[in-house]
Amino acid sequence: MEQFQLTLYPSWDVQKPTIPPRSRFYHLEPIGVGTPYTESLTSYLIRLAQEHCVNVSQVLLTEIAPLIRREKGLSFAQFESISKVCGIDRDRTAINGMGLTATHLVMALEALTSQKDLRFLTLLPLAEIVSKRSLLRPIRAWCPICYQEWLNTEQTIYEPLLWSIKIIEFCPSHHHPLLSKCPYCHQQQLVLCRNSRPGYCNKCGHWLGKRSSKKAVAGLREGETFDNHFSYILNNVGELITLASGHDLPIEGYKLQQIFSRYIHQVYGGNVTALSRFVGIHVATLSCWYQGATLPQLDKLLQFTERLQISLVDFLTEEFLADDGLNQSVILPSPASQTRKHLRRLDLEKLQVIQLVLQQVLQESPPPSLQDVARRLNYRSLVLQYHFPNLCSQIQLNHAAYRKLERQQRIQPVLEAALEELPPPSLLEVVRRLGYKNNSYLYTYFPSLSRQIARRYKDYVQACGLEERNRIFQEIQTIALQIHSQGYKPTRCRVAELLQKPGVMLNRYAQDVLRQVQRSLGYE
């Protein structure tokens, strides 16, 4: 009889394995960390929303805002829009900055994605080195050649942190000027909005890269050399971002104060005025820097190091001595060589002649400025103010009143013409035409006209929005019926492929319209 031999198998471990904690969102990896092309936090947030097939506002308002609200102890009503989450009004540049907005968003995104060191996607590592003032540009900027290269090579399309810095005007790779207006709709864009997509216009949805190679590139022409000043800025800011995004900078506020103090005392013997003349920065500004009263602006700090021919990163991280730290080609003027100007002494006869001229100037029409009068007499305005303070003060008041009246006469026709334009311009656009930075002057001196322009533009935007919604409704309905007639269910992906602007399906209104059409066709 055949004998069977039993086979012994190893025992199984039936205990459940320990599952590591899962993140709420995908563990999305940032791009370019540790390089000059480090991704910005706004770009990371947009890509994160795109990976989850939702728009940016849904991520911010439904996922991030509750975490920030819990951190701040605020009510729900305080976060009903993107502007409330990202910054005051429509200034959303603070996301990439170095303040509380960036800090809270970094903490929220790290909690949702389990991704660490997202602070390096902002300028938070530079918080104790440079000032927030004039650091970030308020609008979106991009290099179309970079976009097109990434698309052609099938790389991930994103927006580097370098593009959001105000002093950067050119692309480091192609020396192409950064664009801030869409070539199709000719509108500027916020750095973040509900329909943001990397590489696409937030307004019209068109691709922002250079699709055709036949179009002329508005960068450097053949045979031209890139300006040394812009090259210095691009190289040094890129190195600074590389250092900041790779690890924390080995410098704090008090160390920066010591660096400036060492340069002033070792190179100029404590003569701040002489150094101020050489680097072209006001003496009060330099004094505040080395006393630790204020942090330097990035553009001023680059001006300081460029004039001394020192790398910005070397200036911040290495120990320089007065005799070998500076470039020997820089010729530093000695304090003794700087001659101080003194006020010219005037005799009684000259004083009488000047007084007579100043009295006649008060009768001129239009009233000249004090600088023009001083130029006529070949004196400095300080000399005139020293000897004739009352007359000079009256000349300045007359000129200021004349300029105010002239501005009002120049502005009112522009405002009245804006009320007749089609399509209606926004008040901000009218303000920029007139050369002002904000609308406070117009609201102060032309309140009625300013409110009419603002109200007319608001009505126009609402009408355009309603018209756009009706167009979306008709387009989705037509496409859904077409897909249904072919025997397929009109799902979101199938409808989006046939839409003129596929990104429309990220809009909540478009999704509601599609569900409404699906129900009308008998789909659950």
Image (spheres, rainbow, N blue to C red):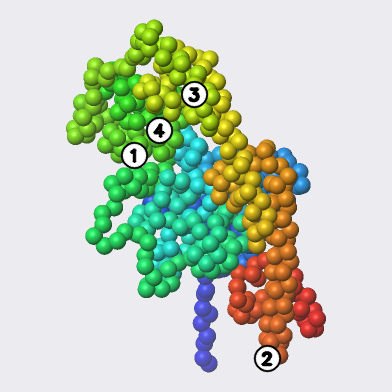
Disc nearer the start of the sequence (2/3): 3
Is residue 98 positioned above or below 273 on the image? below
Do the CB atoms of the residues marked 2 and 4 lie less than 8 Å apart? no
Q: Nearer the viewer, residue 432 or 478?
A: 432
Task: Give the mark toward the camera: 2 or 3.
Answer: 3
| Residue 131 appears left or right of 430 | left
Please, what secondary structure does the residue beneath circle 1 have?
Answer: helix
Q: Residues within 10 Å of mark 4 (few under 14, many from 20)?
A: some
Task: Locate residue 124, reporting x and y percent.
Answer: 50, 41
Query: Could you tell me the amino acid type at mark 4?
Result: Ile
Query: Could you tell me the amino acid type at mark 3?
Result: Val
Residue marked by disc 1: 313
Disc nearer the start of the sequence (1/2): 1
Do the CB atoms of the residues marked 1 and 2 lie less than 8 Å apart? no
Query: Could you tell me the amino acid type at mark 2?
Result: Gln
Disc nearer the start of the sequence (2/4): 4
Q: Nearer the viewer, residue 1 or 320?
A: 320
Residue marked by disc 2: 486
Task: Give the mark toward the camera: 1 or 4.
Answer: 1
Q: Residue at x 31, y 37 (%)?
A: 306
Please, what secondary structure does the residue beneath circle 4 have?
Answer: loop
Task: Give the mark toward the camera: 2 or 4.
Answer: 2
Residue marked by disc 3: 361
Residue marked by disc 4: 251
Q: Residue at x 65, y 62 (%)?
A: 423
Mark 1–mark 4 distance (CA, rounded to whole Å): 11 Å
Mark 4–mark 3 distance (CA, rounded to whole Å): 57 Å
Q: Which quadrant of the rendered structure holds the C terminus? A: bottom right
Q: Nearer the viewer, residue 80 or 187?
A: 187
Mark 2–mark 4 distance (CA, rounded to whole Å): 66 Å
Disc nearer the start of the sequence (1/4): 4
